[in-house]
Each structure stands twice: as C-alpha cells, then as structure tokens.
Image (cartoon, rainbow, N blue to C red):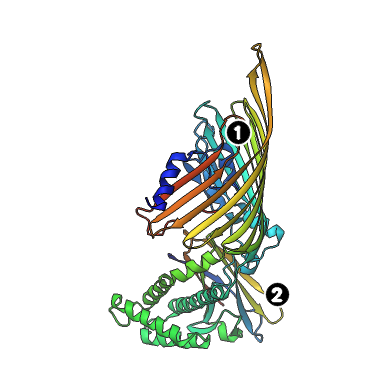
Amino acid sequence: MKPFLKIFFASLIFSQLTVAQEVSKLTLPSSPAFSILNFEPSAVMRPTNAKSLSTDVLSSFDKDGKLKMDLGLETSPYWLGAHPNLKMNTYLNPKTGQTILQSFRLSAATVKDTISGKNKFGLGFRFKLYNGKPVINENTAINTRNLKIRSTINSIINGFASTVEPGTTREEVFDKIEEALKKKEISQPAIDELKKMGNKILNDFPEVDSNVSEFLNRLVETSVDQYKDLQTEVSKRLYDRKGLIVEFAGATGYNSDDSKFERFGFWGNASHFVSPDDFFTLTARYMHQNNDTSLTNVDIGLGFMKKSTSYNVSIEGMFRWYRAAIPDLNSGGQPITRLDKDFTYRLAVQGTYVVSKDISVNLSVGKDFNSPFISSSGVFSILGLSYNLFSKLPPQLPSK
Amino acid sequence: MAVKHIDLGDKYIPKTSNKDIIVEVEIGDAGDEVGAYSIFLGTEFIEANAPANIGKKADVVDKKTTISVTIPDVLEETNWTSMTVFVKEGSGAPTQFGPYRFELENHLDTAIYTLKLSHK
C-alpha cells in the first residue's frame, strides 16, 4: 500500500473528528459578536455609509418595535464616510490613533437559542493598535506608478471628451491627446498602446466625425477594463504588512429573556510578520460564561505559520487555565456547586498542500484542550480533502 | 470594474486682473498615489498632476476651466472617493471647491469626476 493511502486510512481509523475543532485557536475572531454567541447569522448587514447604517438598524426591528432574531451587523465607523484629507501615505503608515480609527470594527448579532428558546444579543469590537509596516518592493512601486500613469491618461482623455467642440474630428482630438501625453512624459509605447485600443473600438463608431465624446468615453472604459489586473494587484499588495501587528477584540453576550450578561471575552494578539507569508503570533484571551454552569478560562498561546503558493504549515501551542462551577448533587442528594480548576493545553500541527488547481489536502494533528465536562484524551488527527467544483480560482489555503 | 462619471459645475470669478490664477487638486480617501487629474482651459490642456497656471482674468473670463479627475478604487475597507479643488490668485487664501465625495458601488470600480468652472 502506498504511504499516502496508509496515512489516509490510519487517519480515518484513529482520528477523533470533533466538529468543534477550529482550524486555529490563535486568531482573533473576525466578528467577535458572532463568536461570543457561537452563531453565524444567516443575514449579515454590512453598511458602508451612514444612510445604509440607519436603514439597516431601522429594518432590524419588526412592526411592533421588537428586535428581529437571526441577524448580524458588521461595520467600520471610520469608513462610513469619505475622508478627503486621507493620503495614501497616512493610510499605509498610520500613527497609533489613526491605526485604531482605520481598523476599528463593530459587530452585533441576535439569535434565538434553539435549545432554550431564549433571545440572545451579542456585541463586539475589534481594532489594531499597531499595524506593522507596508511591504514596498520594486514590483509594488512599479505597479502603483503604472496605475497612476493609467489614471493620468484616462483623466486626460476624459478632459478632452468633456471639452471637445462640435466639428472636431477624432484625428484632431487624438493628436491633441498625444501632445498632452507627451507633455506629461508618458512613454511612446503607452501612447501606441492607447492608439491600438482606439483602433479596436473604432468599429463601434462608424461615422467618422460624430460621437467623438462618446468614442473617448468608451476609450476610457476600455482602458480601465484593460488594466483591471494591475488595479487588482495594487489593491492586494496594500495589505502586505511586515513587522509587529497588535490587535485587540472584545465581545459580550446578553440574554434578553433573563436580563443578564451570559458571556464576555477579550482577545489580544501580537504577531510579528517576518514577511507577509511567515509570522510568529502570540495570543491571549479571557473568556467567561455564566449559564447554569459558570466557566472562566484564560488562554495564552504561541504559534508560527509559513505560507507559500503551494502549501502552508502552522505549529501552535496554547495553555489554558480554567475554573468551572458546575451544579451537582452530593451523596445525600443535596444540590451543591462543584468547583473544577485545572490547567490544560493544546498542541497542533496543521498543513495544507495544493495538489492541483482544484484539489488540496489538509492535515491536522495534535492534542486539544481537556474539558471539565468531557473526559477524553483530546488527541486528534484530521485528514481532509478540498475540491473546488466550480471556482475558477485555485483552492484557498486556510488563513492562519 | 465599472466606471462612474460624476459631473459637477461651479463658478469662480477671478478676484484680480493682474495675478496668475492657479488651480490645484487634492485627491482624498488614499487615492492620491493611484488617482490622477488634468486641467483644461477651454479646449486646451494645461497641466496634469501638478498645480496649473491657467492665466490671468482676461485669459479665462470667456472660457471654462475643466478639471478631470480619475480615481481607481483600491482600498478594500471603503469604496468612497473624494477630491477637492483649490483656486488661488497671488498670495491670497485659496478658494475651495468641494470636497466632492462619491461612494462607488463596488470595490475596484473607478470614479471619474469632471468639474467645470465658469468664470463670469
């Protein structure tokens, strides 16, 4: 039997597949409010401006003024409006206050507990204190400069489209555009490329001297479309950071039927990105839940992750101190509260290998936390296969 | 990757007859390193991505100044774009037009602002 198959069957036999196993325990929840309720709403509102925020908030109540259940809301207050004074340099190299503003996100969720039938409400936040430094290499600089050149060309063409006088021929206006581009030291190959693009769309404008403005507008649209990959690349590279990134999150869960805060949690994470694809991460979190059983845990964990286009590997260890107060009966049948305090840990090694454009293999091996409620060894190994049936993109490597 | 045109109009009456009129544009929402602008007087291209001297009062009064600004959205956090135009004569305080703001429908769309300033 081939080694791969041996591993596969061994994993099937010995693996302890636990649904609750998360890909990683060392990350901050992307939506703390959802995380604290252990619930992913079916409808999540993500308003991007003040008007849509107010509409979303209003639509969250029914005709009797009661909050609807099974809803989620995520928003970044800073980005609800325009910032005419925000420069790219400030955005990429923000000071602490600006980093908090740019990264601050609020999340909220409502859910009806399927077991108890009680209505629950979660509220959370997340922000960065430091966001490392942008990775600006030669390619990034060239791509940004090229996108600016495209924007310059398009603004000049649009300017001529807006000012062209009736009776002006396409040749005349194109000569003027060429003159303007040369004045701004746009390279001859870029000008030639533009001419080629113009010739391609000429067929849509058969009358020689008419529709010059429309022709130029179409030229701008074609030019924008032609350079969408460049724009996408520039956008993606804005999020490559290295250095120290420090992030915090917090959330609370409220039981509106019992009028009590049932859960709250705080997360802190410091990651050092050696490069955008290799980083060390340190996470601390405090979680408390106060239902029939009260459980408090403090976790501290350390991890390392390396990504490449074909694989990723992560190693993580997390230590947990917990205290559980569990209602119980003593030998005389009288109700008592049993206190359970202990220390436990989790160790995990995870890897993903992209086999082909549509297939990736994922393997997780390790030991999970011991639980005061379930007695088990906690050892797990999970072998999985991801297959993209319809996506044009290659399978995604799991994040962190 | 849609292109959205935002057409604007306003008026700037020159305050002096012997001083150069300078037009400048500021692009906001972190679009300054990828966005660009160009300035026209009448049908004549004057300048791009730099302050434009459009001449004195007599040169501009019968014409329109056109400011064309192209801003491709690159930030994932927001689709807002914005630009502000400043017109200055001599050492006087600049006259500000805007900031004009527009939220694009989708990430990676492009906003094209066209502001026409008449001078009488």
- On the image, the x and y values in percent for residue A206 come to 27, 78
Report the front residue among A28 and A282: A282
Furthest-front residue in view? A1
A371 relative to B91 in the view: left or right = left
Q: Which residue is mark 1?
A: A371
- On the image, the x and y values in percent for residue A81 come to 59, 57
Quarter occupied by residue A98: bottom right
Q: Which amino acid type corresponds to the residue marked 1 in the rendered image?
A: Ser
Report the front residue among A330 and A104: A330
Above or below: residue A295 compared with residue B75: above
Above or below: residue A149 compared with residue A398: below
Q: Which residue is mark 2?
A: B93
Residue A170 disc label:
none
Marks 1/2: CA–CA distance:
69 Å
- On the image, the x and y values in percent for residue B72 come to 50, 68
- On the image, the x and y values in percent for residue A297 come to 67, 37
Q: Which amino acid type corresponds to the residue marked 2 in the rendered image?
A: Ala
**Residue drawn where x is 60% and y is 67% of the image:** B28
Above or below: residue A353 compared with residue B39: above
Q: Are marks 1 and 2 on the same chain?
A: no
Report the front residue among A282 and A109: A282
Look at the image and tell me whether residue A85 can be seen. no
Q: Secondary structure at mark 1?
A: loop
Quarter occupied by residue A305: bottom right
Tell me the chain of label 1. A
Report the front residue among B89 and B31: B31
Quarter occupied by residue A164: bottom left
B28 relative to A398 in the view: left or right = right
Look at the image and tell me whether residue A14 can be seen. yes
Above or below: residue A63 compared with residue B114: above
Q: Secondary structure at mark 2?
A: loop
